[in-house]
Amino acid sequence: MIDIKATIPHREPFLFVDSIIDIGERAVIAQKTFPSTEYFYGGHYPDNPITPGVILCETVFQTAAILVLTNFPNEKGLPVLAKIEEARFRSIVKPNEVLKINAELEEKYGKFFLMNGTIHKADGVLALKIKFSLAIG
C-alpha cells in the first residue's frame, strides 16, 4: 500500500488522490471522489456544480508524481509540471462521482518524464485524456 502523503508533497486542500489501486513500473491507477463540500464547487457553478478541468488535470499530475517518485527513488526534488501537450475533456464530472485516474510513463529524458493520463468515471465514461511532462526540480 502506497502512503500518498509520504510520497508526494501535496496536502489538503490541494491533495487530489484518495487511494492507489495499482502501481507498476510504468503505470499507476488511483481513485478520487470529490465531495460536494469541496471549496471550488461554491463558485464553479453554484447552481450546477461541476469539477473544474484544471482540478481534473492536477489530479492526473499528482497521480503521475506518485508513479515517478515511487519508481525513481534516486530522483531528488519536487515533481513539477513541465508541459501540457494536449488535454481533451470528454465528460463533465459532478460532485461525489468516483473517478479512476490512470497515469502512464511514455519516456524518461534525464529529469523529464513524458506521461499520458486519463480519468474515467465509475460507469466507464472517459472524462479526460491528457498528454504532459513532469520534471523533478
Image (cartoon, rainbow, N blue to C red):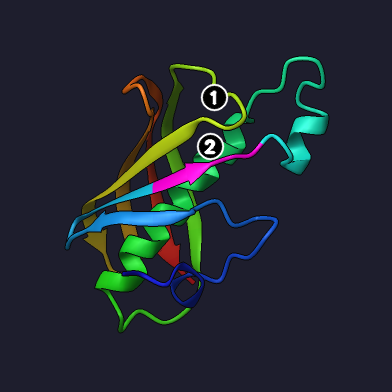
Q: Along the line of sight, which residue is nearer the eye, 26 or 22?
A: 22
Query: Residue at label 2?
Result: 56
Q: Residue 93 — which label?
A: 1
N-terminal of the two: label 1 or label 2?
Answer: 2
Residue drawn where x is 42% and y is 72% of the image:
3
Q: Along the line of sight, which residue is nearer the eye, 125 or 84?
A: 125
Measuring from the top left, give residue 25's x and y in whole percent. 17, 63
Q: Quadrant of residue 12?
A: bottom right
Measuring from the top left, give residue 42's x and y in whole percent. 82, 31
Disc 2 marks a residue whose amino acid type is Leu
Measuring from the top left, give residue 103's x and y in whole percent. 31, 47
Q: In the figure, is residue 4 to the left or right of 120? A: right
**Picture quarter with the N terminus:** bottom left
Local crowd size for mark 2, using a 10 Å CA cut-off: few (<14), some (14–19), many (≥20): many
Q: In the figure, is residue 113 to the left or right of 83? A: left
Asked if the residue under mark 2 is in contact with the one under mark 1, i.e. CB atoms within 8 Å, the reply is yes
Disc 1 marks a residue whose amino acid type is Val
Please report the bounds of the magenta region as a residue range. 31-35
Q: In the figure, is residue 19 to the left or right of 68? A: right
Relative height, residue 72 to residue 41 (above, below): below
Q: Along the line of sight, which residue is nearer the eye, 22 or 10?
A: 22
